[in-house]
Amino acid sequence: MRALINGFLVEINAGGFPAIEFSLSTIALALQGGDSGLLRDFAIIMAVAGAALVLFRQLKLPPVLGYLLAGVIIGPFTLPIPLVKNLDTIRLLADLGLILLLFGIGLEFGWQRIRAVGTRVILIASVEITIMFALGYEIAVLLGWTGTEAVFLAAALSISSSAILMTMLRESGQLLHLRGRLMIGILVVEDFAAVILLTVLAGVATTETTNPGDVGLLVAKLAIFGVAALVFGALFAPRLIHFVNRFRSDETLLITGLALCFGLALAAQQLGLSAAAGAFLIGAVLGDSHHSEQMDRIMSPVRDMFAALFFVSIGMLMDISLAAHFIVPTLIVSGVFIAGKVAAVTIGTLLAGYGGRPSLAVGMGMPQTGEFSLAMVK
């Protein structure tokens, strides 16, 4: 049944970027050795993504959907002969794209806006995750799945896609509105909850039990990293950016910003946390500095290129034929996910003290899955 889950969930390894040094060395050796395969793959991806972007811009549709469609077209499950060969390398670059994407969104959003919604988003996310976990488990049991499979599906349906939702909010200009602020706050809480769920599921997958000590240690790591990142960001990072900006060099500011981005991402990954979450945190802290708009302007071309690669890579993981083979359970689970996510987030937002219209607006925007979901079931 996990094959079915893989059929309608998409995945990117948001938990870090392992073996970067080895992988980048592999890329360099391939290029130096005259291997045109990687360049061919990259050219195909950019060409198809560019064509999809132009088409979806003309149709006034979200560009993210165009990138996903481009990935489906050139992915290994659609054409008889796959167009892209170096999937591992492409996924590495996509991981880097996710890190840069969330760093840029954090830079644009700012930590003060996250603090403005405060504990309310924790309440909303807690209600949502609880309801979705219960719904996912019950629907899996009704479909005849085992208890372990039901737990995996329930966990996967509990988490939304940070990258897709944040990008769509930015593209639509709603990132800084109340709806956008609430959704970003919920996604931040969800990402940290997903890290804990991954640890729990790792124990369930091997022994069908989980070690409370491991979960407690992970929660402690999350708390320590969050506090340390915020303190480091508040005390050191803005001063460093201000000092570097004295040289009036966009190149120097770009490299310094990337160093902070990947430095915090690496620190998070070394602790077993989400590298992308670390990048988002430092980006959000820098987003409150006086140079945030300048940094966002400088980094946007790099971010947009790698972000396109990230979304195309997600599309490449979609196996439409597998979903069609299990069409009835796929439709049932998808319907429960969409309706349940809208209802759960709306209820949570109402309980947090917001009115019916903004609560429903937030709920309607949350039924997206990705990032951690397939990582939970693969």
Image (cartoon, rainbow, N blue to C red):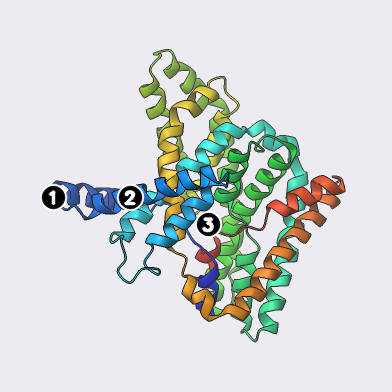
The answer to whether one can see residue 217 in this image is no
Q: Quadrant of the N terminus?
A: bottom right
Name the residue beneath numbered marker 3.
371
Q: How many residues crowd mark 2 within 10 Å: few (<14), some (14–19), many (20+)?
A: some
- Residue 20: assigned label: 2
Looking at this rendering, what residue extends furthest in the left direction?
33
Helix, strand or loop at mark 2: helix
Q: Label 3 is placed on what type of residue? A: Glu
Q: Quadrant of residue 179?
A: top right
Residue displayed at 33% across by 59% down: 88
Q: Is residue 333 left or right of residue 207?
A: right
Is 278 situated left or right of 189 in this image?
A: left
Judged from the image, the secondary structure of the residue bearing numbered disc 3 is loop
Mark 3: few, some, or many residues within 10 Å (few <14, many ≥20)? many
Amino acid at circle 2: Ile
Q: Which mark is residue 34?
A: 1
Q: Residues within 10 Å of mark 1 (few under 14, many from 20)?
A: few
Q: CA distance from mark 3 to mark 1?
A: 34 Å
